[in-house]
């Protein structure tokens, strides 16, 4: 028995020796603790962020209901000054932090009206706008830092600027103003395709023309001088696309050497053609409304619906239709007054963002433009076919109907079967 035990001990010792040696070699490779290595990495990132004379262009991807955009950001040791496309000259300064949370993280940790706009909830947007203020750092080079939003999981990039942020953002704004293509057609891999560009969410969609089934691909884009750029390239019918150049005079969009022709979708209605007076018809009657410009080529205010508020109607430039969705319309004490989509058949209502109706052209003759409003498909098993004036308390919970405000119907209800006919003057 003693002999067997000694043999066993020697065997274990022999097996342990090479393992101990391997572990020592591994320890020599990493002569610093992992926490120290990460701190060194973050300090290197901080040095690179501060090193750019003009700062960085942050390509930003909020929720799909909102357009992609650029921010200009200039980093100091602990503070960041941010510029937005809405007011390129007005920098807003706040703090930022480089920290660890399952990896290296860049966080804009104090409120900044530019950087937190899409990531902060308010009375109209209880779930914010799908944006991020904390980003996992994925890759770092001297000229580009790759980030991924911690909430949205969208890839974003910091690209070193070669000019001052206000000048860069003004150039982007001009590029957006010059970009007037909403749909295109062409040939990819021997087949005819059609595509659309949604100026609300900045989403490109491309698919086979007239195909009952087949590949359709969507990707969100950034508008840049001379065309569009897609951060994460996509493949369609075996061809990889990322950058497209736009020639307004020729009416072309070119990507990966393939020239697409600008086109107008069937049934398309221009922004200008929606402006003016309409007769709004509903199940129990009708009244006159007027669509007036709110933000050029983006939205309208609908006058005449009520004496208390004017709903915002958005314009889908890619398809030429209107969207009328849930929105906050005012405040009464601690109550937020909302325009709530209503399924008149089931009696249910909702204040979920994005739920509402889209317009469909019923008649587009020279003398008459008739629209039909129908559910936009966001509500799941229910169908928005009418509207209610409702209220939410300070916590965002149901506070009941708000009958003190009324539609032109004389009630807080606007029943379904809503259509609109353009008044020709």
Image (cartoon, helix red, strand yellow):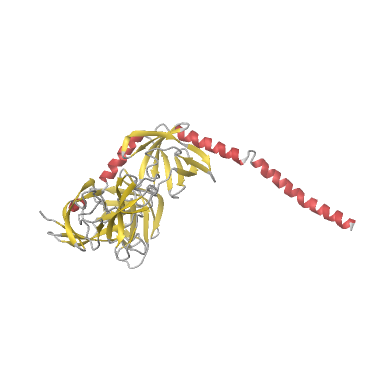
Question: Farthest right residue?
Answer: 2
Query: Can see residue 164?
Result: no
In this orientation, does residue 1 appear? yes
The quarter of the rendered structure image containing the N terminus is bottom right
**Can you give x and y, in whole percent of width and height, for residue 381 in the image?**
36, 64
Left or right, 43 with reference to 239: right
Residue 70 percent location from the top left of the image? 36, 42
Q: Nearer the viewer, residue 107 or 10?
A: 107
Q: From the viewer's perspective, is residue 223 above or below residue 380?
A: above
Of all residues, the one furthest to the bottom in this rendering is 212
Query: What residue do we see at 27% from left, 53% from top?
Result: 403
Task: Give the side of residue 149 with respect to residue 229, left or right.
Answer: right
Residue at 43% across, 43% down:
133
Q: How many marks?
A: 0
Looking at the image, residue 334 lies above or below residue 409: above
Residue 269 appears at what percent x and percent y? 21, 56
Locate residue 287: give its quadrant: bottom left
Q: Position of residue 393 (x, y in %)?
A: 36, 49
């Amino acid at each position: 028995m003693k002999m067997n035990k000694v043999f066993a001990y020697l065997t274990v010792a022999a097996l342990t020796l090479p393992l101990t040696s391997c572990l020592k070699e591994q320890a020599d490779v990493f002569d610093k603790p992992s926490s120290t290595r990460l701190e060194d990495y973050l300090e290197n990132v901080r040095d690179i962020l501060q090193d750019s004379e003009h700062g960085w262009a942050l390509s930003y991807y909020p929720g799909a209901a909102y357009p992609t955009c650029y921010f200009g950001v200039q980093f100091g040791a602990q503070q960041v000054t941010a510029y937005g496309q809405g007011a390129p000259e007005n920098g807003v300064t706040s703090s930022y932090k480089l920290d660890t949370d399952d990896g290296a993280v860049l966080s804009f940790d104090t409120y900044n009206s530019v950087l937190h706009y899409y990531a902060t909830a308010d009375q109209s947007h209880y779930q914010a706008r799908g944006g991020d203020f904390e980003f996992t750092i994925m890759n770092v080079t001297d000229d580009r830092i790759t980030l991924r939003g911690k909430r949205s999981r969208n890839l974003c990039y910091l690209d070193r600027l070669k000019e001052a942020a206000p000048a860069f953002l003004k150039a982007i704004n001009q590029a957006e103003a010059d970009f007037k293509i909403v749909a295109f057609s062409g040939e990819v891999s021997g087949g005819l395709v059609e595509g659309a560009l949604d100026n609300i969410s900045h989403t490109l969609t491309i698919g086979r023309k007239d195909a009952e089934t087949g590949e359709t691909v969507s990707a969100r884009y950034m508008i840049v001088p001379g065309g569009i750029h897609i951060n994460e390239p996509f493949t369609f019918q075996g061809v990889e696309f990322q950058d497209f150049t736009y020639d307004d005079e020729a009416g072309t969009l070119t990507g990966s050497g393939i020239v697409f022709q600008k086109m107008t979708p069937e049934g398309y209605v221009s922004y200008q053609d929606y402006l003016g007076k309409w007769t709004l018809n509903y199940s129990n009657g009708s009244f006159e409304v007027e669509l007036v410009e709110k933000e050029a080529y983006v939205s309208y205010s609908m006058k005449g619906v009520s004496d208390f508020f004017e709903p915002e109607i958005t314009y889908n430039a890619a398809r030429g239709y209107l969207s009328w969705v849930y929105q906050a319309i005012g405040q009464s004490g601690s109550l937020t007054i909302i325009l709530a989509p209503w399924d008149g058949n089931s009696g249910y209502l909702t204040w979920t963002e994005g739920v509402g109706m889209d317009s469909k052209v019923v008649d587009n003759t020279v003398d008459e433009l008739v629209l039909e409003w129908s559910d936009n498909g966001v509500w799941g098993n229910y169908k928005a076919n009418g509207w209610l004036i409702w209220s939410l308390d300070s916590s965002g919970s149901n506070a009941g109907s708000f009958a003190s405000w009324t539609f032109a119907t004389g009630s807080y209800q606007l029943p379904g079967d809503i259509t609109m006919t353009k008044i020709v003057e």
